[in-house]
Image (cartoon, rainbow, N blue to C red):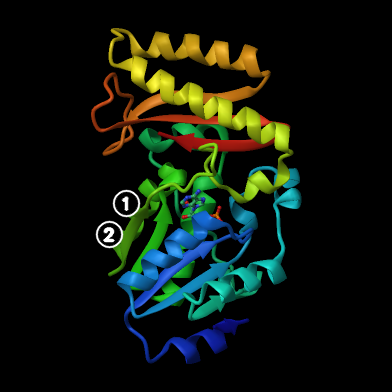
Amino acid sequence: MKILLNNTSLFESLRPFNDLGFVPTMGGIHKGHLSLINKSNKLCKKTIVSIFVNPKQFNNKKDLKSYPQNIMKDLKILKKSKKVDFVYLPKFKDIYKDKKKSKITLLKKDKILCAKFRKGHFEGVLDVMNKLTQIVKPKKIFMGEKDFQQLYLVKKKLEKKYKTKVIPCKTIRDSNNVALSSRNFLLKKHNLLIAAKIYEKLAGIKKYIKNKKNVTSFLNLQKKELKNNYKIKIDYLELRNIKNLKISSTNKNSRLFIAYYINNVRLIDNI
Ligand code: AMP
């Protein structure tokens, strides 16, 4: 596993390879990331993982400051997996060397779910993914369904622009069905137990949707109940079609999306 600390060493090392699988991350490596790496390892000749906490996608300074970072631990896990050929650890200037302001904007119809509650977040994500794709030139990019809206937007924007394919990967969960996330490192055991109960409740809600005529009002009621029972703040609880992310009134081709806070940590999930 070769560690690439700047773009010069990246360009030199990657030159011979044109079947590259790319797994972009912000570190805090867990089994969710490893599942993406495994898939890349199976489908591509070489796998490159990047670790870069992109300040431009944080709409809240506190959130950026508290984002879990432990590069030595991450490198150890990646090396142990034996599935990673290159790890790219860029500095801010490697990514943003041309100071041109990014022109990426979201369409009004895309300003939903997390885009509505985290202003500028996806513009930051699309900007860094655009830059990373230009630098790494991967054949395939592996991204998790846990961040479904991110996967949806990156796929829509990047596949049009580059010869790269964005490959969706299933959400990996812990033994209590809580979606793995680097942010879970910021939670205490009892917080994670609440997250497990919320997953259970979501699964129940999804089942009940089948028999409901007015799904939106049913979900509003469930949202209130979740808020009161678990004393959590909820940004959204919505059923949306996976092809276009429009509000849906049936489970067919749809997922239930939630964003909520436990202990000031923002968690997202979709089932
Ligand atoms: P992050 O480091 O949180 O930016 O995540 C990097 C990539 O890993 C993104 O494509 C995420 O969607 C993906 N990912 C994060 N958590 C999970 C998970 N529990 N299961 C599958 N993929 C995940």
Q: Residue at x 54, y 42 (%)?
A: 175
Residue 264 visible? The answer is no
Q: Determine the residue located farthest toward the left in the rendered image.
A: 252
Instruction: Judge from the rendering whether residue 159 lies leftward or rightward of residue 104; answer left or right.
Output: left
Decide which of 229, 219 is in the foreground and name it: 229
Q: Position of residue 164 (x, y in %)?
A: 31, 67
Q: Which residue is mark 2?
A: 160
Callout 2 crowding tier (Cα within 10 Å): few <14, some 14–19, many ≥20: few
Q: Are marks 2 and 1 in contact (CB under 8 Å)?
A: yes
Q: Quadrant of residue 245?
A: top left
For the C terminus, give its image quadrant.
top left
Decide which of 140, 121 is in the foreground and name it: 140
Q: Residue at x 53, y 56 (%)?
A: 31
Q: Position of residue 133 (x, y in %)?
A: 42, 69
Callout 1 crowding tier (Cα within 10 Å): few <14, some 14–19, many ≥20: few
User: Helix, strand or loop at disc 2?
Assistant: helix
Residue 219 tag number: none
Amino acid at circle 1: Lys
Q: How far is disc 2 from disc 1 in space, using C-alphas?
A: 7 Å
User: Helix, strand or loop at disc 1?
Assistant: helix
For the N terminus, give its image quadrant.
bottom right
Residue 156 tag number: 1
Decide which of 148, 80 is in the foreground and name it: 80
Q: Position of residue 10 (x, y in %)?
A: 52, 84
- 171 relative to 83, above or below: above
- 176 relative to 182, above or below: above
Amino acid at circle 2: Lys
Q: Residue at x 42, y 56 (%)?
A: 143
